[in-house]
Image (tube, rainbow, N blue to C red):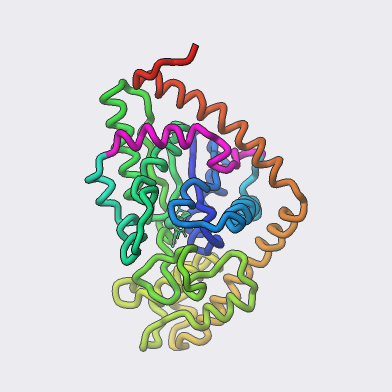
Amino acid sequence: MKRVLSGIQPSGQLTLGNYIGAMQNFVKLQETEECFFMVVDLHAITVPQEPAALREQTESVTALFIAAGIDPAKSSTFVQSHVRAHSELGWLFTTLAYMGELERMTQFKDKSTGKDSVGAGLFVYPTLMAADILLYNADLVPVGDDQKQHLELTRDLAHRFNSRFGDFFKVPEPYIPKVGARIMSLDDASKKMSKSNPNPGSFIALLDSPDVIRKKLSRATTDSGREVKYDPANKPEVSNLMTIYSHCAGLSLDAIEAQYDGQGYGAFKKDLAEAVVSVIEPLQARYNEIRSSGAIHDILKQGAERASVVADETLAKTKELMGFLAPK
Ligand code: ATP
Ligand code: MG
């Protein structure tokens, strides 16, 4: 059995991109592997968060994990800040990372470009992510394509630690879907769909009402042609919508092309919206049940207890290897 670790930030409403790129794999992997899934609130504060909204989003993301099919009895489901070892190992790894390698992170460039003031946390965030993963000695990390570079850094830091202080950390592998690893924005297919995008028209939130979903998809950017054809280089907008359709309706890209041959974008977009709604409606029903059940706090408490057992042991051993004097 492999160990699996991943997380999602409570930095806004979860999107269809998070669902297709990450959560669907969480649900699949928990059937055969030992899984740890967390709501990474310490990551979310690398950009300013309003305190009440952060609290609400943290509960909301947890409920969406469960609504999407994560079973807390199988997978340890917890909030990152509830397991203190994350912050502490994060600092230790910050001291192992080089400025140059952090400067090369494209997410930092994307999130800091054009901003007047950029938090130092946004810059060092990949070292905290490395700590998150290595605390559990994870074998596999299911993420979208945008996290590949951070995973590479995690692997480098694990190697660096092992060669300086002795072989200890397992070097983790990314687990990225073949199709759907990078769902693009609805208004600009050169950018990935992101929950923190200030334009809500750019993403489908998992909690959007069916009518909002229909409206957003009918307004989604296409091109001046009329052919429903999968060609990411020349038709990035239509190819992105086809990827979403393929995931939601369980149809191959070829089948979609054949179905809309000669029909133009109108019929395609209408059916696409219904396919998305058919995935999201039952998910929302489960979400509402979980929110009103009041079970979230108990789930998170148990998840944090299970995670802490593993994380505390790794942290203690790391500190010993690095030469910290243990308290007597
Ligand atoms: P933010 O804009 O705040 O960074 P986000 O939408 O990028 O939010 P994260 O919490 O950073 O979401 O990422 C959670 C998981 O979802 C990660 O595994 C990430 O790779 C994946 N993911 C994020 N956006 C997409 C996307 N557009 N397509 C596929 N996977 C995605
Ligand atoms: Mg992100």
Residue 126 appears in the rendering: yes
Foreground pick, 131 / 74: 131
Q: Nearest the camera: 149 or 114?
A: 114
| 310 displayed left or right of 284 | left
Depth order, front residue of 158/121: 121
Instruction: Please provide percent x and percent y for residue 50.
Output: 55, 58
Specify start and end residues of the magenta stretch as a single range: 73-97
Question: Farthest top residue?
Answer: 328
Q: Residue at x 58, y 75 (%)?
A: 213
Q: Residue at x 36, y 87 (%)?
A: 225
Question: Residue 300 in the image: x percent, y percent?
Answer: 65, 41
Q: Residue furthest front?
A: 117
Most extreme residue toward the left, as rendered? 100
Residue 231: quarter of image = bottom left
Count how many numbered circles sit on residues in the image: 0
Which percent across, then down, holds residue 139? 43, 36
Residue at 60 percent across and 31 percent down: it is 306
Where in the figure is residue 295, as x and y percent of width and height? Answer: 74, 46
When the figure is inspected, residue 98 is found, relative to residue 256, above or below; the finding is: above
Name the residue furthest right: 293
Q: Quadrant of ligand 2?
A: bottom left
* Quarter of the view holding residue 299: top right
Determine whether, in the image, residue 145 is placed left or right of residue 42. left
Q: Is residue 94 magenta?
A: yes
Relative vertical location of residue 225 with respect to residue 142 in this rendering, above or below: below
Q: Quadrant of residue 47?
A: bottom left
Q: Residue at x 75, y 49 (%)?
A: 294
Q: State whether residue 68 appears in this view.
A: no
